[in-house]
Amino acid sequence: MRVTIPMLNGSSHVKTFITILLLPLAFSLTTACSSGGSGGGEVAFIQPGSLIENAEYAARRTRLMDQIPAGVVIILGAVTPVETYRFFQNNDFIYFSGVEIPNAVLIIDGVHRESTIFFTMDERTARGEGLPAGLVADPVGFTGIEQAEPLDGLEPYLADLSSQVEVFYTSYFPGELTNINTKEANNSWRRTMTQNPLDGRLTRELQFVEYLKREYPRVEVKDCASTIWNMRRIKSPAEVALIREAARIGVAAHNELIRNTGIGMTENALAAVFEFICRREGAQELAYPTILMSGTNHPFGHYHRNDRTLQDGDFVILDAGPDYAYYNADISTSFPVNGRFTEYQRELYELAHGLLEVCLANYGPDVSLADVGRKVEEWLVDQGHDPTERRFRGLIRWGGYNHSIGMATHDVQDSFGDAEQLLPVGFVFACDVNMPYDEDFGLRLEDTVVITEDGCENLSIGVPRTVAEVEAMVRQKGILEIVKR
């Protein structure tokens, strides 16, 4: 199918960069697993906080200080898991420090223009947690944070500060851990706990707010969540590099899952392949539970029980991505289980693919999502479609935009404004063509995109997108065909 993609007037420089840093297009798990190699090419673990320079963390703390000249921000780190789960730091704490120590507290002081980290851990415990010994032996030198104190010094420190500052800022929202968006978590906690008449407990963060108000009544206590969210909205080059790597890993995992798809294959086995590739390529976790929708599960946008055995004629939507060093990618692919599109599936798939290409061709820093949406509408008319159809409504209104992406898959931001707002450089988001059709068939093509000075970069380039690419990849052999029961 040949399509003509309309470009925004006067913006010939707006283009989709096919920058593929660190993306081995020749990646083939089948080859790797059958080569009998020694495993010397495996991806080594890298301490997540080390991938961004201390100077960048310090600059973030300074920017926050500039916005709170009369107060201090108190950021609670994540606590040690109650079970034997792996510890993950909460995103705000990592964003300002790069530190993964459990039970830590970070104070960013806008009055005295310095920061202090509070934690208690010895070198042996740090080794047992997989943390660098230098982090606890010389935390100031290791992190660049001006002061480091034991955790039991926090209360006297706050008591002393309470006579010197006007405001204690802290987040009123739940700590944002892996697989979590703090706004969504807050809504869930309110519904099931804090505003539930059968419960009524406060979150840890709201209990801390009550503690501050009770113990330091002369100091005003304010929520700083939206201030932090606005800082996190625009990604630095170092952050974009981490999301790019997450997308590279996600592309490799999508491709291997597609290779393993076939009649009689279980969704659960395919989900295991996706997680295996993500971890093998260096991801610390999945960005969210792998979503595999097939058969009658198509209408349910986040169906992730993975409980079907695939049948001839099934069509799969795969929505999945990794978490790499606390940064996520969000990618969706759609494909026929038997490797052959029906005429009906092909027609609708090529429509969705054409819409995706129109969006990617028109994003840029001097345009708005509404501008892109108008190009989507123009293209639909040129292709003989009625743009007033319900399935096109969101694509036209928001120009393919669904949500921002960063440390959370649905990354936090205070407010997006409206569709006429110009796209800023460093904004990372999901270009998501999501069009359900009926109880047994739907399509989703989703890429992770960043706005650049010259246009945009599709960070998740490399998944099969044309009908021919999809059919060819489904017919390739995958690891499950080689490592048989």
Image: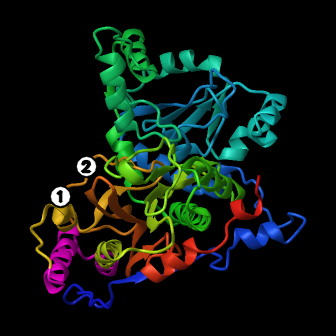
Which quadrant of the figure has residue 341? bottom left
Write down the residue under mark 1. Answer: 418
Distance of mark 2 from mark 1, alpha carbons? 9 Å
The kind of secondary structure the magenta stretch mainly shows is: helix
Disc sitting over residue 295 in the figure: none
Disc sitting over residue 415 in the figure: 2
Point 71% across, 57% down: residue: 280
Q: Is residue 174 left or right of residue 84?
A: left
Point 28% across, 17% down: residue: 195
Q: Give 353 or 104, whichever is nearer the viewer.
A: 353
Q: Give 93 or 386, whichever is nearer the viewer.
A: 386
Q: How was the colour assigned to the protein in this rendering?
A: rainbow
How packed mark 1 is, by other alpha carbons closer than 10 Å (few <14, some 14-19, many 20 or more), is few
Q: Is residue 44 visible?
A: yes
Point 78% across, 58% down: residue: 44
Q: Amino acid at mark 1?
A: Asp
- Circle 2: element type: loop
Coordinates of residue 357 in the picture (x, y in percent) = 34, 79
Coordinates of residue 448 in the picture (x, y in percent) = 43, 65
- The image shows residue 56, relative to residue 470, as above or below, that is above
Q: Amino acid at mark 2?
A: Ser
Q: Give 253 or 22, whichever is nearer the viewer.
A: 253
Q: Give 229 or 379, whichever is nearer the viewer.
A: 379
Point 43% across, 32% down: residue: 72
Q: Which residues are magenta?
A: 357-384
Q: Quadrant of the N terminus?
A: bottom left
Direction front: furthest residue? 312
